[in-house]
Image (cartoon, coloured by chain):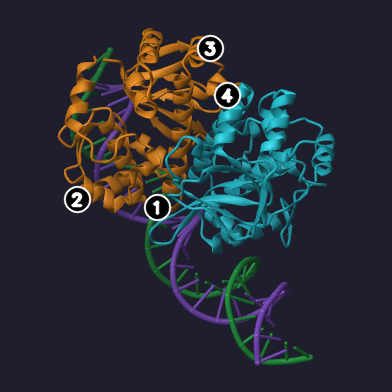
Chain colours: A cyan, B orange, C purple, D green
Amino acid sequence: MANVFVRKLQSFVNLTPAAVEALEHASACTRTIDGGQVMLSEGDQPRSAHAILEGFACRYKVLPGGARQIIDFLLPGDLVDGHMLFMAQMDHDVGALSPCRVADIPHNTLLTLSEAHPTIGRALWWSALVQGSVAREWILNNGRRPADKRIAHLLCELCFRLTSIGLVEDHRYKLPITQTDLADASGLSVVHTNRVLQKLRRTGLIMLEGSNLTVSDLAKLEHFAGFESGYLHSAEPTQSEPGERAAQAQGSR
Amino acid sequence: MANVFVRKLQSFVNLTPAAVEALEHASACTRTIDGGQVMLSEGDQPRSAHAILEGFACRYKVLPGGARQIIDFLLPGDLVDGHMLFMAQMDHDVGALSPCRVADIPHNTLLTLSEAHPTIGRALWWSALVQGSVAREWILNNGRRPADKRIAHLLCELCFRLTSIGLVEDHRYKLPITQTDLADASGLSVVHTNRVLQKLRRTGLIMLEGSNLTVSDLAKLEHFAGFESGYLHSAEPTQSEPGERAAQAQGSR
DNA sequence: CGTTTGATTGACACGAGTCAACACCAGTGG
DNA sequence: CCACTGGTGTTGACTCGTGTCAATCAAACG
């Protein structure tokens, strides 16, 4: 019933019904953003927090030379700038990869809610911890895995995260991401990324038609990539009932 | 007067005198660990939090093949496992790089203190946010900077962080870190790390005698590495009085 | 003294980057 | 309706940064 954002927080911490309703109410004010648009820039001092309800976005940093490194992908349910509740200014950019619908929640509101409902504050805190954990895994992935496993691992992570919000259907999910994005996320060049993807397809580990990715044998891909979902600290153990969750996700607009 | 850990939290959030005293009291129970020892392993479920008071440590993850990636360096004042207040189990290892003195603070105590002194909870939260921010910068550094700038950037970060706790004296600081560690942190091989270090020395950017690193012209090194301290979200702007801070640090055992 | 750990070298191999075309498609506008 | 455009994917040829292997050295240590 609640929106993806609230449901995700719920999966972290057991929110009281009152807290859920308050959050739901607070995140009612939404806004859409075109794909390719910049949502937040380095140095920004937003006065409200943003949660993604629909669409894909990403954090990234840009080097003087123009090189870009994607730091994290932001999926429906993710809190974009929770850290801005306390920090002075953004230390990275956030851009929409596809058209996005985001909820705007004023910092005041969020802070007030956190005091009224301690579970909310804890959920936000937890969210920050998980994002940190994911970032650490990315350091490992980009630092010590060869290109093919690196990209495979990234795809596994996306698959896992999308599954938990019911966006994977029949082993297939939409990836509104260009090969350039994939390259910038894994620290490779576009050309090499292209070749690696071809190899993954030839090997039968993935199937790509346009922006639709099919992973017929997830276990095989995960084994190849050395993927273990522990670092995502998801509430549900690996063996959850994806059906039920998916149904829930579909149900809420 | 307070210990490094408390002082660092203070630099994040303005703790009340009562909070400072409570924290100081809570972190009075210390313990020493030999260099090279493992402090925490993946899967551990510690019942107390650990703060480093003296010595160097690092977070790292290990791949099945044996490859190791260092995720972060832990310096005096750093909270090692703040995330374990909420998470089920460690998703990475922590090892001491040099003999360390660490404070053990039971989770119960820390949680109780957080409720009694809201500023403490906020300081811990902030600490998690900063660690996340640092991790994101590492992703950029290891993903998009060439080997020489990568290592230079790492050295800049260490210099900056050590300066803020008064461990840099006369442009020189102790680096109890082997080239293997440096390699594992920057995602390079030991051999190449060695050659890069030689180049940095030849260029006059750094001076290495044993484990003592001297950076005579910090501005030059920072410029070369493209280092900007913003991501460390340090309270003090770049132009602080290192003299005073250093004196403080020396004073407190 | 042997032993061990860390630093250093050289030779060589290979993964990944770069450059430059070209193909394909969706818009877009004349 | 078709030419033109820009973005994305795909290729090939070539270069170059890093990794690997193996040997040597230096310092620390029992």
Which chain is indicated by disc 2?
B
Say yes or no: labels 4 and 1 on the same chain.
Answer: no
Q: Quadrant of residue A211?
A: bottom right
- Cα–Cα span, label 3 and label 4: 26 Å
What is the secondary structure assignment of the residue under circle 4? helix
Left or right position of B66 against A105: left
Left or right position of A77 against B53: right
- Cα–Cα span, label 3 and label 1: 39 Å
Quadrant in which the N terminus of chain B is drawn: top left
- Cα–Cα span, label 4 and label 2: 56 Å
Q: Which residue is mark 3?
A: B47
Give the residue type at disc 1: Arg
Give the residue type at disc 4: Glu
Q: Comparing marks 3 and 1, which lies closer to the viewer?
A: 3
- Which mark is first along the chain, 1 or 2? 1
Q: Is residue B49 above or below residue B192?
A: above
> Is residue A219 visible to the viewer in this orientation of the structure?
no
Q: Comparing marks 4 and 1, which lies closer to the viewer?
A: 4
Q: Position of residue B239 (x, y in %)?
A: 23, 40
Say yes or no: labels 2 and 1 on the same chain.
Answer: yes
Which chain is indicated by disc 1?
B
Give the residue type at disc 2: Arg
| Residue at the (21%, 47%) spot, across then down | B201
Say yes or no: labels 4 and 2 on the same chain.
Answer: no
Q: Comparing marks 3 and 4, which lies closer to the viewer?
A: 4
Q: Which residue is mark 2?
A: B202
Q: Which residue is mark 4?
A: A115
- Which residue is at the front of the view, A91 or B97? A91
Q: Which residue is mark 1?
A: B145
What is the secondary structure assignment of the residue under circle 3? loop
Left or right position of A43 against B101: right
